[in-house]
Amino acid sequence: MPPPPDGGDLVDWDALRVETGWELPADYRDFVAVYGMGAISDSIGISTPHFEGSPYEDHMLFRAEQRVADGELTWASNEAGDDFLWRCVGEPERWEVIFRPRSRGQDHGYEMGMAEFLLRLVRGEIHPPLEAELAMPATFESWREEERRLLDVDGNLEGF
C-alpha cells in the first residue's frame, strides 16, 4: 500500500503524552508519520490525535479521558460503523487490537499491533467480519489528497 506523496502527519508525541497521559504504540506512531490521517481503500478511516495543520477539531482523543488503565481507544472505523480499537492493558506495545462490528454482537481480539493487523488484513491473512467491503489491492488516501480531490478547479467543494 503506497504511502501518500505528501507523507504523513507530524504529531508532537511528547506534548501529547504530557497533556493527555496517552502514550500510543510505536507502530501506530510510525504509521502516522508515514501515512497520516486518511482512509484505506476508501473504507477504513484512520484517526490521529490533533496535529498542527489538522483540518478537523474532532480527532482521536477529542473526547478521550486522561489515560486510564484497562481502557479502550478507537484508532479507526469504517463507513459501515465497524470500529477498530486497542484494549489498553499494560504497555502500549502489548495492546491488543479489537475489531468491534457495528452490530456490537461480539468483539474480535487480535494479539498483534495495529500495523501487523492492517498488513495481515490487506493481505487476506485475517478475516474479521467487516460490515463494509475492503477493495483490493489496498490503497491509502490521506486527508490532504481527499481535500484536493473534493475541491474543484475554482477551489470550491464539488457539489456545493
Image (cartoon, helix red, strand yellow):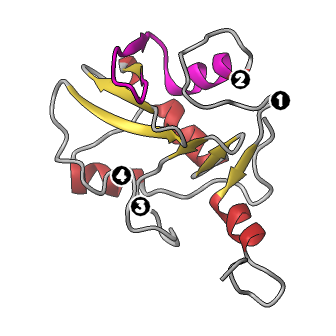
Q: Secondary structure at mark 3?
A: loop
Q: Position of residue 63 (x, y in %)?
A: 24, 54
Q: Residues within 10 Å of mark 4 (few under 14, many from 20)?
A: few
Judge whether 53 appears above or below 49 on screen. below
- The residue that label 3 is drawn on is 50
**How far is the residue under mark 2 from the one under mark 3?**
27 Å
- The residue that label 4 is drawn on is 14
Q: Closer to us: mark 2 or mark 4?
A: 2
Amino acid at dot 4: Asp
Q: Earlier in the sequence, mark 2 or mark 4?
A: 4
Amino acid at dot 3: His
Q: Residues within 10 Å of mark 2 (few under 14, many from 20)?
A: some
**How far is the residue under mark 4 from the one under mark 1?**
35 Å
Q: Earlier in the sequence, mark 4 or mark 3?
A: 4
The residue positioned 48% from the left and 39% from the top of the image is 76
Q: Which mark is residue 137?
A: 1
- The residue that label 2 is drawn on is 122
